[in-house]
Image (spheres, rainbow, N blue to C red):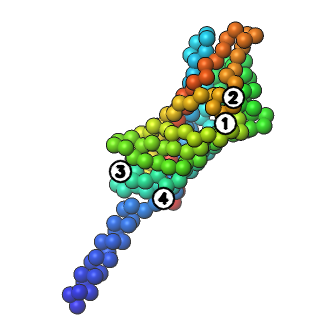
Amino acid sequence: MKSRSITFLLLLLVVLSLQGHAQAEYRIDGKPTLKVSGTSTLHDWDMVSDQATGSARLTVSGSAVQAINSASLSMPAESIKSGKRQMDGNAYKALSTDRHKDVKFQLTEAKKQGNKWLISGTLELAGVKKPVTFDSNVNVAGSKVTIQSSTSFKLTAFGIDPPTAMLGTIKTGDDVTLSIEMTLSAIN
């Protein structure tokens, strides 16, 4: 009888510990902020979107993410706005938004390093897919996970000629930074 009680107690502990570390599906909640930042011969610039769909499969224990098992994100390319119509038009032309409607990211690996995460995956811009790594902060509050991520890359790495304006007198720099802030909510 004593061995049954011990076996039952061990089984109960295993089940309870698995519940605390279970994978769960999460989706973007509210309006994310996706910002592309760069330079030009005239001024620094930002283009921002608050439209994206995406999901992630996370392992959360208490108030910490233990693993990021999968993740994907998609944003309409023409939702990125600078507040300047001509600049937006030049950007959409460079991104070939007539043929490539979305900017996409697909996770390939996520590694925790100290308090930060390195989130690696495939970024698709203008129909070209390249590997990128985001430096990320990931925080848990109840059933919500907030993610702040940033990565830098060259437009030319994606086959994109940096846009120009005013007959080529204003030139966009090749280096850009993509920053993402979003909240994910657990799906029940």
Closer to the camera in the image, 162 or 61: 162
Residue on which disc 1 sits: 125
Q: Earlier in the sequence, mark 4 or mark 1?
A: 4
Q: Amino acid at mark 1?
A: Leu
Q: Amino acid at mark 2?
A: Ile
* Residue 22, position as x, y percentages in the image: 43, 62
Q: Residue at position x 59%, y 44% from top?
A: 122
Q: Which one is closest to the eye, mark 2 or mark 1?
A: 2
Residues at marks 2 and 1 touching, judged by CB atoms closer than 8 Å: yes
Whole-angstrom CA distance, mark 1 to mark 3, is 34 Å
Residue on which disc 2 sits: 160
Q: Residue furthest left?
A: 2
Mark 3, secondary structure of its residue: loop
Q: Is residue 158 visible?
A: yes
Q: Amino acid at mark 3?
A: Ser
Give the class, few, some or many, for how many residues have Cα within 10 Å of label 1's Cα (few <14, many ≥20): many
Residue on which disc 4 sits: 24
Q: Residue furthest bottom?
A: 1
* Residue 181, position as x, y percentages in the image: 50, 36
Whole-angstrom CA distance, mark 2 to mark 1, is 9 Å
Q: Earlier in the sequence, mark 1 or mark 3?
A: 3
Mark 1, secondary structure of its residue: strand
Label of residue 19 in the image: none
* Residue 139, position as x, y percentages in the image: 40, 44
* Residue 19, position as x, y percentages in the image: 39, 65
Label of residue 63 in the image: 3
Q: Earlier in the sequence, mark 2 or mark 1?
A: 1
Closer to the camera in the image, 124 or 158: 158
Q: Residue at position x 45%, y 42% from top?
A: 118
Q: Is residue 78 above or below residue 9?
A: above
Q: Is residue 79 visible?
A: no
